[in-house]
Amino acid sequence: MLHAVIMAGGSGTRFWPESRDLRPKQLLKLVGERSMIQATTDRLEGLVPRDRVLIATNARQAAGIAEQLPELPATALLLEPCKRDTAPCIALAAAHLAKRDPDAIMAVIPSDHVIRPTEKFQQAIQLSADLVAESPNRIVTLGIRPTYPAESFGYIERGEPLANTAKAQVAPVYRVVRFREKPKAAAAAEFLAAGNCFWNAGIFVWRATTILDYLQRLQPELYAHINAIASAIGTSEYPAILEREFAAIKGISIDYAVMEHASDVVVIEAPFDWDDVGSWQSLARLVGTDADGNTVSGRHLGINTKGTIVRTNGEHLVVTIGLEDCIVVHTPDATLVARKQDEEAVREVAQQLPERGWRELL
């Protein structure tokens, strides 16, 4: 059966001051009236039953996620005692699913992407599941056709179309030649010009037992800790063993741990529109702009203001005069004002706040 694992443990520091430790990016309403994680679970409606959805997150964020997703059973929350990157997260989820359903096919989906339309997304995931059912050791990933030479995404180099599959009418399916790490500008431009590379969307479909087998072979130390945890699932010792064994794992991404070394990997060219909503500037693409190129959410009075993103809440009015290509985000206890070109420095806020004794603003 098809199960969904939604990875929701990120902090989204680029979205400070709205994003905080207990209210990270995936819990924010950045696009539309639903939060990112609510929109992600909505996208699964009719494809994966609620009792086959797992939300992989950390213990600190559990209460906020449960509050936003009351329709999911308590067992849907899979809590990691500490952050250890995507491979340990996926391994833990796979171990739980394999216990519940030895034939489980798991779709791994980030919680903080914008994907439209839902129908095309569901068709792509169902096609992925069919391809895995057809060849149980197969790994399926989804690739996004690049529109510019992005340096912030990994790339997937595609090979020949997958032969003998009538299912490709949903979307093209190719064999994967190799995964490429986030490139420098020149390499990204080459990938774009070559026309045979996709952005890596971080969406994967495979059998739970298949990914565990890969980890056992390629990452034996990581697997040993996960296997110890798996042996304790359903017992009173599980919480203590989970905390001890998971903390002992060295963090590593699933791309480094498995994808760069796996065989029989295919990529589906995503038939849907996709955005990873990586920074405040993403909102201009997703929400749109006014006649002056401004993207505004909340009460704003702009005088000689152009190309600026403004967010505020409640009745608080933000007035901008003479701003161009800036970001202004107001929250009750903190306000961000930055030039768009300096947006990457927002990440430094999370490093400097504790140093100044302002940890409560994280």
Image (cartoon, helix red, strand yellow):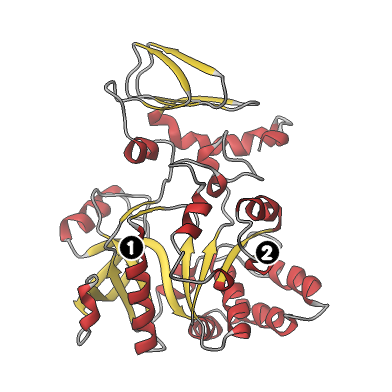
Give residue 36's mark: none
Depth check, front residue: 54 or 8: 54
Lower sequence index among marks 2 and 1: 2
The residue singled out by tag 1 in the image is 119
**Left or right of residue 267, residue 254 in this image:** right
Q: Position of residue 149 (x, y in %)?
A: 26, 49
Q: Position of residue 268 (x, y in %)?
A: 29, 70
Q: Position of residue 209 (x, y in %)?
A: 52, 86
Residue 99 shows up from this direction: yes
The residue singled out by tag 2 in the image is 79
**Left or right of residue 65, residue 33 in this image:** left
Q: Position of residue 132 (x, y in %)?
A: 38, 83
Amino acid identity at mark 2: Leu
Residue located at (24% from left, 71% from top): 170
Residue 119, quarter of the rendered image: bottom left
Asked if residue 286 is positioned above or below residue 230 in the image, the reply reads above
Residue located at (42% from left, 75% from top): 205
**Left or right of residue 235, residue 73 in this image:** left
Residue located at (32% from left, 51% from top): 184
Amino acid identity at mark 1: Glu
Q: Give the Cα separation between the discs numbered 2 and 1.
A: 30 Å
